[in-house]
Image (spheres, rainbow, N blue to C red):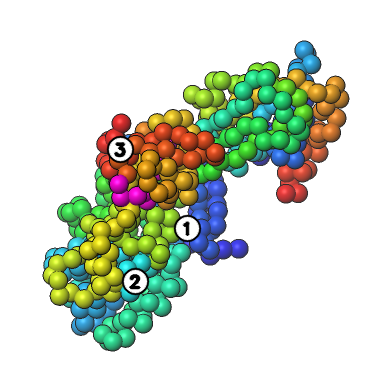
Amino acid sequence: MGKKTPLYETHQAMGARLVDFAGWDMPVHYGSQIEEHHIVRRDAGMFDVSHMTVVDLVGSEARPFLRHLLANNVDKLQEKGKALYSCMLNEQGGVIDDLIVYFLEESWFRLVVNSATRDKDLDWIVGQARAFGVDVIEQSHLAMIAVQGPRARDKVLPLLDEANRQAAADLKPFYGEEHGDWFVARTGYTGEDGFEIMLPEDQAAGFWNALKENAVQPCGLGSRDTLRLEAGMNLYGADMDESVSPLVSGLNWTVGWSPQERDFIGRAALQRQRDAGPKEKFVGLLLEDKGILRNHQRVVVEGAADGEITSGSFSPTLDRSIALARVPAQTGERCQVDVRGRLLAARVVKPPFVRNGKALVG
Amino acid sequence: MSETPGDLRYSRNHEWARANDDGSITIGITDHAQDQLGDLVYVEVPEPGREVEADEACAVVESVKAASDMYAPIAGTVIEVNEALADKPEAVNQDAYGEGWLIRLKPSSSDALSGLMDADAYREFVESE
């Protein structure tokens, strides 16, 4: 038996199909993952993401520590509550994990990291924090619920207490705020508007049930994956890991190159790669033939080395198969993919495929 | 609980087979199989005329998550395939034993179905898995 979130019994009662995900028993769907996908694009759905790891960094040197720890520049966070997406690199420029960091107080930042990488992340962060005298405090008593979709805000706000409701209503995208024991952020992993809400674990089931009453569809990790893929958002472990750098993972935009004197972990290796010119690039693929693109399929580019699909699936919004892939730098507008022994035609596009309910490619 | 009609025969690979009046055999995947796979988004069927051996992979059913082979539960010649699944793979989810059929075979031997399980045996098999 795997680890259970505070919502495990609730998922069972609501008819979820539960699967193992990084050691956790998590819902993959509640009947139809395609239906759940469409509801998030058109209305509102909710995901139990309590398996994710929330880590607070506390101490007067928290900001200098993050300047060193993260590839993105934490100094972009000047307003309280603002969030930043970043990679955490090793010395070779490989990606240890991707994460969100929130600036709460000058001596208090909050990280949300992946559950599959929890142990190595904590080891790494604690190890690096020592020199800065920063305390690393895992907040494992927090549950986390993501409510996503064009109607998510309208359906969440009436269910919050006065203080959180006021704050959440005024939140700009990519900001979060804490009131009482609740932390509400206007963030997500679907390409839709919505909230990610951290709350005490003993209140999670009550809030989940209230959302259900308010016509928010419970959704599983299955639709979460197709939603993030359409939104062109990377998945750690599939699209990048410690063997590749952000520069060949479509994450150049998350590297804070300036100021030049900021000495973040992995900077030297990344700079060398950048100077040499990366041999690969990270693109979106749109399958033109019938079939489904899958992780690890070979991408065939005329006159160049092979590439590889890092995330491939079916796009319910586009009603065709899409993928993210790492391909040779000289790849043009077309390529082929080896799908179960057949070479199928695909078009190279720039992700995202879908944002805010609208198809961006066709 | 998934459906297991009593008039069909079943394989250990979760295919069903129905004997038609003209001696041909219609084949699909079971309700249990479609439930395990989840929403199907692509089905690839063989060319009519293809000869298949028993337990030979002869079709592919793909859910959002993964691709799975369908194995011919018996040997025979493919005489018809369900073309409609190209545009409506979800028919397998919605009606596994009807609209969601995959192929029709002319069996190589007349007692081809005798090696397959009946509904009770299949139900037991599913529970034991």
Is B53 a magenta residue?
no
Distance (Cα) linking label 1 and label 2? 39 Å
**Quarter occupied by residue A261:** bottom left
Report the chain holding disc 3.
A
Indicate which disc residue A333 carries: 3
Whether pointer 2 and pointer 3 mark residues with C-beta atoms closer than 8 Å, the reply is: no
The part of the chain drawn in magenta is A321-330
Q: Nearer the viewer, residue A308 or B101?
A: A308
The residue at 73%/46% (across/down) is B127
Give SS at disc 1: loop
Report the amino acid beneath label 3: Glu
Percent position of residue A83, x then y: 23, 62
Eyeballing the image, is A26 above or below A322? below
Residue A322 among those drawn in magenta:
yes
User: In this image, A174 relative to B9: left or right?
Assistant: left
User: Mark 1: few, some, or many residues within 10 Å (few <14, many ≥20)?
Assistant: many
Query: Circle 1 is placed at which residue position?
Result: A7
Using the numbered discs, state the Cα–Cα distance from disc 3 to disc 1 in whole angstroms: 45 Å
Mark with earlier residue (3, 1): 1
Label 1 marks a residue whose chain is A
Mark positioned earlier in the residue sequence (2 or 3): 2
Observer able to see residue B59: yes
Observer able to see residue A219: no
